[in-house]
Image (cartoon, grey):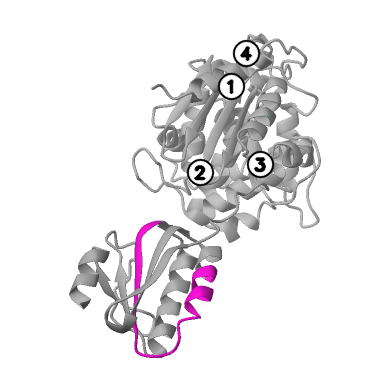
Amino acid sequence: MRTPVPDYLAHVLDDCDDHHIGQLADYIPELAQANPNQLALAISTVDGEIYSVGDDEVEFTIQSMSKPFTYAYVLQHLGIETVLNKVGVEPSGEAFNQISLDKENRPKNPMINSGAITTHSLIPTDGSQSSAEILRAFMSELAGRELHFDEQVYASEIKTAYRNLSIGYMLRTVGILETDPVHIVNGYIRQCSIRVTVKDLVRMGSVLANGGVDPKTGKRLLNREVVRQVLSVMMSCGMYDAAGDWLTTVGIPAKSGVAGGILGVLPGQVGIAVFSPKLDEHGNSVRGIDIMERLSRDMGLHLMEAAPSAQTIVQSHYLTGVDDSISVYVLRGVLKFTEAEMLLRILQNEPEGHSKIVIDLSKISLIQDVGKRMFLEGIDRLIDDGHTLLLVDPERRLDHSRTYKDRVLHVFENLDELLEQQH
Ligand code: GLU
């Protein structure tokens, strides 16, 4: 059998192929030379699989889709508080190149140009490498291959960068930029000229979808809190003045670029990248938006359409042993807050006494931190009630050898063995 996923993606492209409204970005002269018919789509799964169709080998400039990665880089190196002192997180409702600041004289968010120029200025450098080079290396690591600058697009944008330069001077005037604004704006424009394919973008997106760990290498590239901050800002500010529309219709944190790319990242699920150069009046790819809307609908990806938690965390419960003195709970699924609460509510019915309670965690696929904390707390309380607790946890998902009250956890490899030993 061949998985139908690529066929489905090809079908989505076919369906939208003859849609020709929109304009090429022409304020960067080189972008006006793009082939308007190009169309590509890729998705990455959270375990690093990549599917792509259409012009998936075509490189184009990352443009504003670099902004979330620059933001991630400075958050990772300087911490969230330091960065917040310079750039806010409020949607601006304005065009991407608006010359504006919030009440505290900060750019409103890192996804508009003023905020992105500021985050670029924050990249720590010892002078041996330019900030744009540092970012190129960082994005290459995320993409899993060496990325390059597009010298032509860079040179072309530099020649006409009056608006970004005025943003730079304005930021320097209010002290948000602390060094030469021309140099910083140059670096920012260079960052925007990094060439990517949709496959690169989704590979980069898979690291964000996977909470900061590269699913291909297992290496942690970004802290969890950094990823959460970046995706939140993409959700509220990623699509410029169309953010509200995007949130309601597509509901996937995303960032677009004026070369015609859109990168969407659904935490814990997928990265999606589309490329089609013609833009709408907000600067977002017309066919890109169509495709993202379609995928969100077909694949049930809207963030607000979260799948309900498992209806039951306890797969089975039975009594065994002499006088039914052993109470066995076999759990299955994912142990997050909702399931942990459900489990503790069920365990609450265990009568106080000296019975043994066996909890089999071997069919649990994931224990979130909160699930772990609640579980360990529950165990202490059951022991307080006089119970003996025996656990089956062959993969050591609990990752603790003692409870919070410093009681040793009795952990077994296998339920049958455990029960045999008790008879
Ligand atoms: N380099 C472009 C600019 O700063 C990026 C804009 C965009 O992609 O939205 O104007």
User: Is label 1 in contact with label 4 (beta carbons under 8 Å)?
Assistant: no
The region drawn magenta spans: 341-364
Q: Earlier in the sequence, mark 1 or mark 4?
A: 4
Residue at 52% over, 38% down: 270
Mark 1 vs mark 3, CA separation in Å: 35 Å
Q: Earlier in the sequence, mark 2 or mark 3?
A: 2
Looking at the rendered structure, the kind of residue marked 4 is: Asp
Q: Is residue 254 above or below residue 39?
A: below
Residue 275 placement: quadrant: top right
Q: Nearer the viewer's eye, disc 4 or disc 2? A: 4
Residue 161 in the image: x percent, y percent? 70, 26
Q: Residue 361 magenta-drawn?
A: yes
User: Which class describes the residues within 10 Å of circle 3: few (<14), some (14-19), or many (20+)?
Assistant: many
Q: Describe residue 376's horizontal placement relative to residue 177 as left or right.
A: left
Label 1, label 2: how far apart the Cα atoms are: 27 Å
Q: Which residue is mark 2?
A: 208
What residue sits right under mark 4 in the picture? 14
Q: Quadrant of the N terminus?
A: top left
Task: For the residues labelled 3 and 4, say whether their Cβ atoms are less than 8 Å apart.
Answer: no
Return the x and y of residue 314 as percentages of the image width and height: 45, 64
Q: Nearer the viewer, mark 1 or mark 4?
A: 4
